[in-house]
């Protein structure tokens, strides 16, 4: 079982008994406001949990989707993941989602930083990227804090509940990460 620890968090594999905690945030319209998935039905969440568990057992493993728990009161507060490209396996997309009750506490930044470390140090990635809605200021701040660079804007590249939206693309290279760690 994959487990990573940060100062305040535990990142671990997702289990079937995480359904309720995942569904609590994934079915919340405010949590999924800026993303093309959700709000989840129970079936959507069950499918997500099942696919995530199957991807953890895949060889080679392409998706590293982990539950995020707080260390002081162990409970799942969200998920964070790296999605490795099948056609270019030294790159991955970073994604995350958290319940509203923990917003503003720095958990997204802490877990995303851990995923950069995992991606570059354990998985040997060359590049990690992320996309967010231009109006999602909280997600933009997370990506800035972890050292990602705004690489550009994709115009009308996604549909969120029937509305065509732009995306901002952020990225960080392994060499950027190594330089950033030297300054920490």
Image (spheres, helix red, strand yellow):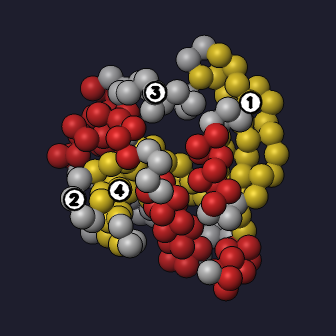
Question: What residue lies at 22% left-to-right and 37% top-to-bottom?
Answer: 20
- Distance of label 4 from label 3 (alpha carbons): 19 Å
**Of callouts 3 and 2, which one flags the residue occurring earlier in the amino acid sequence?**
3
What residue did someone put label 4 on? 68
Relative to residue 44, is residue 61 drawn left or right? right
- Total labels: the figure holds 4
In this rendering, the answer to whether 59 lies above or below 67 is below
Q: In the drawing, does residue 16 fall left or right of residue 91? A: left
> On the image, numbered disc 3 is attached to which residue?
30
Which residue is painted at 53% across and 49% down in the image?
A: 95
Q: Is residue 72 above or below residue 55?
A: below
Quarter assignment of residue 113: bottom right
Q: Residue at x 65, y 16 (%)?
A: 163
How far is the residue under mark 4 from the one under mark 1? Answer: 28 Å
- Label number found at residue 74: 2
Residue 148: x %, y % from top left: 70, 60
Q: Is residue 35 above or below residue 109?
A: above
């Amino acid at each position: 079982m994959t487990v990573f620890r940060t100062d305040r968090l535990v990142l671990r594999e997702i289990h079937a008994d995480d359904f309720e905690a995942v569904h609590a945030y994934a079915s919340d319209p405010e949590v999924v406001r800026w993303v093309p998935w959700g709000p989840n039905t129970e079936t959507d969440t069950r499918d997500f949990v099942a696919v995530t568990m199957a991807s953890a057992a895949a060889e080679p493993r392409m998706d590293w989707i982990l539950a995020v728990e707080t260390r002081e009161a162990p409970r799942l507060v969200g998920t964070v993941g790296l999605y490795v490209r099948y056609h270019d396996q030294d790159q991955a997309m970073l994604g995350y989602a958290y319940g509203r009750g923990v917003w503003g506490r720095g958990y997204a930044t802490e877990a995303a930083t851990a995923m950069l470390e995992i991606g570059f140090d354990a998985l040997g990635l060359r590049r990690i990227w992320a996309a967010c809605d231009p109006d999602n200021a909280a997600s933009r701040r997370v990506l800035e804090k972890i050292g990602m660079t705004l690489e550009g804007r994709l115009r009308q590249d996604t549909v969120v509940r029937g509305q065509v939206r732009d995306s901002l693309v952020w990225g960080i290279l392994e060499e950027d990460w190594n330089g950033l760690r030297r300054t920490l």
